[in-house]
Amino acid sequence: MTDEHHGLVARLRVRIPHLVGVHCIAHRESLAVKDAAAAFPDFKIINDVIRALGEIVGHSTPWFFQRRSVDITLVS
């Protein structure tokens, strides 16, 4: 929402002219990696491997039960 003309920061700047809009570090990093990945095809392969590992860990039995116990605790 930091579009120069239509984003939230632009709308707030109408009322607060000295406002400085800043992307959080996580979003800036995400945008930088996305641009770098477009420039270097090998980044796509690395990204695919990392995503696959995340899927494996996310669906592993110990992780599932640990996460499930947290969900039950929060609901109870």
Image (cartoon, helix red, strand yellow):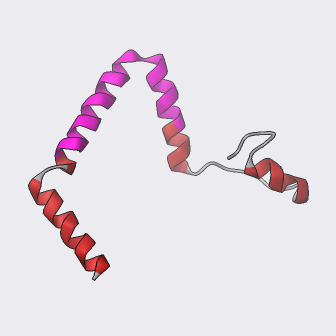
Vertical placement of 73 versus 33: above or below?
below
Q: Position of residue 28 (x, y in %)?
A: 56, 42
Q: Residue furthest left?
A: 61
Answer with left or right where residue 14 lies relative to residue 70. right
Q: Main secondary structure of the magenta part?
A: helix
Q: What residue lies at 29% left-to-right and 29% top-to-bottom? A: 48
Q: What residue lies at 16% left-to-right and 58% top-to-bottom? A: 63
Foreground of the two, 76 or 4: 76
Splitting the image into 4 quarters, where does residue 61 fall?
bottom left
Q: Is residue 53 magenta?
A: yes
Splitting the image into 4 quarters, where does residue 55 fall?
top left
Residue interval drawn in magenta = 31-56
Q: Position of residue 40 (x, y in %)?
A: 42, 17
Q: What residue lies at 33% left-to-right and 30% top-to-bottom? A: 47
Answer with left or right where residue 9 lies relative to residue 64. right
Q: Position of residue 13 (x, y in %)?
A: 85, 53
Foreground of the two, 11 or 16: 11
Q: Is residue 73 magenta?
A: no
Foreground of the two, 69 or 57: 69
